[in-house]
Amino acid sequence: MPREYACTLARMSIVVQKYGGTSVADADRIKAVAARAVATQKVGKDVVVVVSAMGKSTDELITLASEVTDNSHPREMDMLLTAGERISMALVAMAIEDHGVGSMSLTGSQAGILTTVEHGHAEIIGIRGDRVREGLNEGKIVIVAGFQGFSPETRDVTTLGRGGSDATAVALAATLDAEVCEIYTDVDGVFTADPRVVPGARKLEDVSFEEMLEMAAAGAGVLMARSVEFGRRYNIPIHVRSSFHGGPGTWVKEETMEEAIIRGVAHDASEAKVTVHGVPDQPGLAAQLFDPLAQAGISVDMIVQNVSLQGVTDISFTVPRSDLDMAQKVSESTAAEIGAAGVDVDHNIAKVSLVGAGMKDELGIAAKMFRILAEHGVNIEMISTSPIRISCVVRGDDVGAAVRGVHDGFSLGDDQESAENG
Amino acid sequence: MPREYACTLARMSIVVQKYGGTSVADADRIKAVAARAVATQKVGKDVVVVVSAMGKSTDELITLASEVTDNSHPREMDMLLTAGERISMALVAMAIEDHGVGSMSLTGSQAGILTTVEHGHAEIIGIRGDRVREGLNEGKIVIVAGFQGFSPETRDVTTLGRGGSDATAVALAATLDAEVCEIYTDVDGVFTADPRVVPGARKLEDVSFEEMLEMAAAGAGVLMARSVEFGRRYNIPIHVRSSFHGGPGTWVKEETMEEAIIRGVAHDASEAKVTVHGVPDQPGLAAQLFDPLAQAGISVDMIVQNVSLQGVTDISFTVPRSDLDMAQKVSESTAAEIGAAGVDVDHNIAKVSLVGAGMKDELGIAAKMFRILAEHGVNIEMISTSPIRISCVVRGDDVGAAVRGVHDGFSLGDDQESAENG
């Protein structure tokens, strides 16, 4: 991403604010977004606002398409869906102008958001941003459509897929050398665990990029990994905060103030498990198993291979539940080819992960987690670890008990800040 | 409009089809549009489809804006409204692809529709059309958003105002040197009078550009004058036809087959009359009266000045009823300045016009029209004429009787084709 414009002017510091669909769901919320953007400008910031489509409008457009066609039309679907942000961004710009402040909305193309050509899940490859800078230099609050860009190769409009608006905001913040990218959402920030599962979960003041990446990958839905990765790469602090009140949320940044060993517990109940039984234990068979899955576009998360007994082994892996049917089909075909005994699938699993940068320097964290799960009667089916994360696959029905047990066991909650987590 | 591409290739002849909001109002109608476009391609034509926004969706977007703001935001309103065609054009392209035919939707910007900068009522100043030609050369049916373009001066999206999609279609047809521009609508074509007023009104097989221009200006709503003017200037035949059946409609073109003296009766009940009384009859006073109206953006239609009596005169003129309050205010201010006696306004008027190219060579048409109106007890308040049109302002309550009387009197109906109108 080019940063040649950064620091060439004694410009005011830039704040990028991203508002999701819930935050622009109706006229009153749009006016609240405008008021907040104007207030931010009033304290001396240059403000860029990135918006998603209003409320459920993207779903409504998808329904409209499904009434017309049963087939996939990737280019035209992107043309259709990008109407959504066009509507919300124009309305936000109007509401800002009503404060007597200049404003200008820009589509992904107009803002120069360059992407790859993959319709529906394009990746940002660069941001020109000239018109954004021009608008800021004219004293305007610039509104940019999230989730969309265009491919310089085909000159076609593209969308970025899940979490796309966050990615737009953080990438724009990086291009503009913003002081912060604020992600406004319907929760108060990043918590030590999902508050719907753990009532005593505590809002984190800050969390490192690395920890947030692991938490996002482990199922913490508040931020997608791709946005955090942008923030990490260009060192743009991300402030995740509520669009309903002005209080601070959670800062995602390079250095954290609170040097906790454990940051939080994430869980993910959206995956399923596939087990291939009786795989002949020969070199190259794993590749034969996973290559066809990759070619089918299936993202495999955890993989566990059992100890080989009598020349055969079992291989288990997890995939998004939405891909399970395809994964089963592909795996059964491969199993037949390589002479494996058979394929089992299991819908009823969940993944519980403990994340914390301090884990690297502290022994016994994994052992403690396993002990806590056992004490709560939770059986562990698969385990995977990174230097700052431990993930366990458990029965789907056990996920609440597992998350609450681990959260309590590591004293992550509000009123129990122990020495262990000081 | 550049035509440098015309005839440089031995290309197939091009048909531009324009579908209004009613024709793309739901999934079934969108599929019907797709089927018709594909059928047209199957008989060997290159097909370009121009679409309006679905049904009432433009009104819905305007309502949304009115919930957010009471003020005028011309640039952002255009950004908002252009979401409408984006949705319909993507859906039409999907439905075409479902026939196994390549398709591609293009926004006004992508199609290179260059306009002036006046948001909400921009004028087309040129069409690049490169991507349209590329799409046709690849065998695709190209869908272009009607009603919208962009200003090369500001690089902003613009809309063309009332009748804008028709203008897009005819201008595109001119640029592409199309063999015909088909305007699909919810009526069967152009009639000798409004069938809702005159049940015996006859559908015209053809009508000249000049006649259609006069009829459009006189209130025939089926085509706006700006589209007819494009057709006339570049000699692109316009076929106005029904989107509900395949039968022929009305051809608007240079030469008509049927050399009728009178083509039809148009009426317009959307205007109101302003009369300035006791205007001192001195040179330059008319300019003093009408300059401020022009500056206020009020379009004055008919003007009649009475014979001067004792150095003072009355001046009456008609304006769109929506502009009446403003016209009254401006005129009262001018009347005070120039020492006129006062200003009257009259909401309850209507204009009845007789249009026909043969009128030029035939004496007594006006006299016959006046006599017919008198026989039906209709009083004439104002008269204006062009070489091929006579318009009379009558009481609003008399408009039905006036239109039916003139239509019958000139034998314009289905089963009464007289020698006079042969």
Image: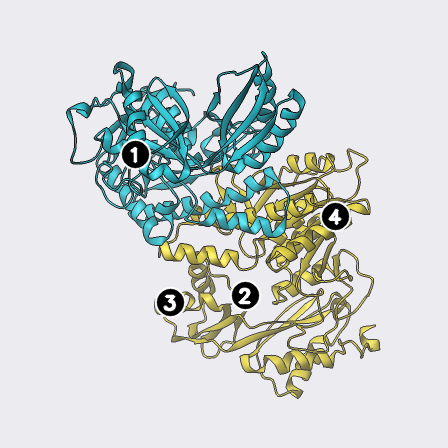
Chain colours: A yellow, B cyan
Q: Amino acid at mark 1?
A: His
Disc number placed over residue A301 in the picture, else none:
2
Please tell me how crowded label 1 is: few (under 14), some (14-19), or many (20+) other residues with Cα within 10 Å: some
Discs 1/3, front: 1
Disc number placed over residue A329 in the picture, else none:
3
Pointer 2 or 3: first along the chain: 2
Discs 4/2, front: 4
User: Label 1's element?
Assistant: loop
Q: Are marks 1 and 2 on the same chain?
A: no
Please tell me how crowded label 2 is: few (under 14), some (14-19), or many (20+) other residues with Cα within 10 Å: some
Judging depth in this view, the residue of A222 and B356 nearest the camera is B356
Which subunit holds the residue at mark 1?
B
Q: In the picture shown, does residue A364 fall above or below A136?
A: below
- Please give the name of the residue rendered at 60% of the width and 84% of the height, measured from the top-left corner: A378
Q: Amino acid at mark 2?
A: Asp
* x and y percentages locating residue A166 in the rendered image: 63, 53
Pointer 4 or 2: first along the chain: 4
